[in-house]
Amino acid sequence: MIKAEFTWVNGKLVPFAEAKTHVGAFTLHYGIAAFEGIRCYKRHDGRSAVFRLHEHIERLFESAKICAMEIPFTAQQLEVGCAETLRANNHPEAYLRPIAFVGSGQLGLGARDNPTETAILTFPWSPLLGDDGARDGIRAHISSFVRGHLNTTMSKGKISGQYVNSILAKRESQRLGFEEAIMLDSDGRVAEASAENVFMVYRGRLYTPPLEMAILAGITRDSVLVLAREAGLDIVEQSFTRDMLYAASEVFLTGTATEIAPVREIDGRIIGTGKPGPVTQQLQAAFNKILRGPGEPRPDWLYYI
Ligand SMILES: Cc1ncc(COP(=O)(O)O)c(C=O)c1O
């Protein structure tokens, strides 16, 4: 359940119960909206900081541009809006969901004059695949749903309608008793999970699919790559196949909602020892230190509220 007292709507904080939209909203019918998923953490020193807020808002504007939508606010106004909403809700630790969508007016596909509505929700949300998932690893499968071709899915945009593909994959994985779906692209290469990027350790090197594939340019993915580089790991941003995943010594998923989730099994094959491996644990520890401390290894990634 989304629990909040206030929501930011078109520049103003309104009571959560009043943050409503019309059934004629264009986005409700066609799924064109740009959105973000961001987290704010309570740190060791008691202060709260949003992780890489600037990069998330930058990606929100990129997603809107891909949709040929104009957000009627500046990035700075939205960053301040995020902080205001967190403070109004008294949320020291929360998930943030800014969204820009096309409101009510005309319903023809070519409508250009409907208003762009902008909103920011904040609410408490624990890691998507659970604390157990982060500690012990999750079970995943290769989805029968495929990521769209590069010219079908605008994968660099975090665009609402594109999540139908992810939801179908997620529902299939739940029905089959798995926690997450790993999706291939239209050429059969490993792309990403329903809402996470994929990493694996294969023959001693850290692999993740490159950005020229149909994947979201995950901000957690980027953060993990920075940490892996600092740790001197041998990094390969290159496409790979599902059988390489089966044979990998470690597999993990990265995303804002999920953070870093080790994968212990894929399609009935135990990955490595079946427990989070040393590279995954090392990266999880480095990542958690940035989010919560102690110390402040990456102040440039924190926006204090
Ligand atoms: C499809 C997809 N891939 C990857 C990610 C991970 O991106 P990030 O780390 O920026 O949250 C997400 C989550 O936003 C996602 O929805």
Image (tube, rainbow, N blue to C red):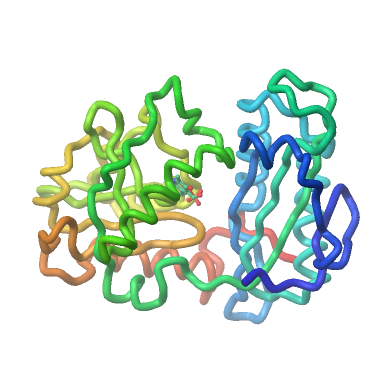
Instruction: In this rendered view, identify the residue nearer to me: 105 or 266.
Output: 105
Tally the marks.
0
Specify the quadrant that holds the N terminus: bottom right
266 or 58, nearer to the observer? 266
Answer with the quarter of the image where residue 137 lies: bottom left
Q: Is residue 303 left or right of residue 141?
A: right
Q: Nearer the viewer, residue 51 or 30?
A: 30
Give the quadrant of residue 44.
Answer: bottom right
Left or right: 52 as drawn, with respect to 203? right
Picture coordinates of residue 260, whole percent (x, y): 38, 62
Q: Position of residue 50 (x, y in %)?
A: 64, 61
Position of 204 with respect to 163 (left or right) is left
Q: Residue at x 69, y 73 (%)?
A: 3
Q: Position of residue 28 (x, y in %)?
A: 68, 42
Pick the residue in front: 156 or 235: 156
State left or right for residue 98 relative to residue 286: right
Quadrant the C terminus occupies = bottom right
Query: Is residue 12 depicted above or below 104 in this figure?
Result: below
Identified at 41% across, 36% down, the residue is 215
- Which residue is located at x 17 percent, y 38 percent? 241
Q: Residue at x 14, y 61 (%)?
A: 271
Residue 158 sits in which quadrant?
top right
Measured along the vertical axis of the image, is residue 47 above or below residue 296?
A: below
| Coordinates of residue 60 in the picture (x, y in percent) | 65, 40
